[in-house]
Image (tube, grey):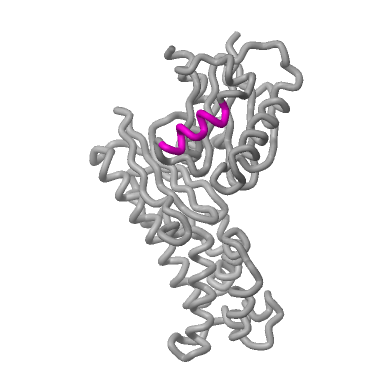
Amino acid sequence: MSYVLGIDGGGSKTVCVLMNDKREILGRGKAGSSNYQSVGIEAAKYSIESAINTALIQYKNINIDAICLGLAGVGRSKDIEVVKNIVKDIPIIRNIEPQNIIISHDALIALVGGIGNDVGIVVAAGTGSIVFGRNYQGETKRVGGCGYILGDEGGAYKIAVAGMQAALKAHDGRLVYTSLIEDFKSYFDLNNIEELIEVIYRSGLGVKEIAALAPIVDNAAFLGDEVANNIIDDAVNELVKATVTVINEIFVEGEFVEVVTTGSVWKSKSKMWERFVSCINPQIKVIFPRFEAVYGAGLLALKCWINT
């Protein structure tokens, strides 16, 4: 029997699964962040190795034939080289043939895990956003994923920022009244909405903390607030445009395509998922993930081993 490892490494956690050639998960390990750009090289290496060791705790004497590491922040060849250097001294990985070591960005494993194979499109919308597709010829197209300053339209961070901007504009009289004024006042226990400025600029809120405010906008939209609904519609439209761009770039008109939606934004009370689906060509099948991203990493490792 053959054994492979799949790793899903993000900004908050790293998950590793041990999989056999029957696609069965035999072991699972979890550790901290493995995004070297945010936590550093040594911390990333420690997280990857810890997750692997935990996944193999009951299978210490087996040989690992292949591994796939799908990591956040690994979108360029330079990043891949950095990760290669990070993992080359991890004992388990050191014993794997180089051609059986896959290092990719996390959108690819989300696609494979979400759909169950490596053809289709993933629309990932969490704190940020990215749309990634791959066709039967192996051609890929990526749209977005440029970070909270340069991109991430449709993600929770941009939704939250748009909501706070709208509340301040409405207070100034530049926008019609919105319940977001009272919502943000209540959330932060403010006397007036202008105090939001001090909270945001002086409290040291990071990207994830600001993104966590998106449900305030979502709930206001759910309750019928016009301004909040416009913000949600804008977010959906950005994700639709990105998805259509990928479809037009690498898929033939009329070709069957599955689009898997992943990330916290799709849990919206204001029906972002339904709004998105209504804007996509009915020939395109939009689904929720069939499997988790780390399972996709395992499938890619297994495919690599089989094709060796």
**Image quadrant where one finds the N terminus:** top right
**Residue sticking out furthest to the bottom:** 173
Question: x, y (%) of residue 155?
Answer: 49, 58
Residue depicted at 46% across the width and 91% down the height: 173
Task: Answer whether residue 258 is visible to the viewer in this image.
Answer: no
| 212 relative to 307, above or below | below
Question: Main SS type for the magenta part?
Answer: helix
| 156 relative to 243, above or below | below
| 139 relative to 261, above or below | above
Q: Is residue 143 highlighted in magenta?
A: no
Left/right placement of residue 187 relative to residue 144 reads right
Left/right placement of residue 48 relative to residue 279 reads right
How many numbered badges does the structure rendering display?
Answer: 0
Question: x, y (%) of residue 199?
Answer: 64, 76
Residue depicted at 63% across the width and 84% down the height: 195
Left/right placement of residue 63 relative to residue 129 reads right
Q: Which residues are magenta?
A: 78-87
Residue depicted at 50% across the width and 29% down the height: 84
Nearest the viewer among 221 and 73 is: 73
Q: Is residue 86 highlighted in magenta?
A: yes
Task: Answer whether residue 243 is visible to the viewer in this image.
Answer: yes
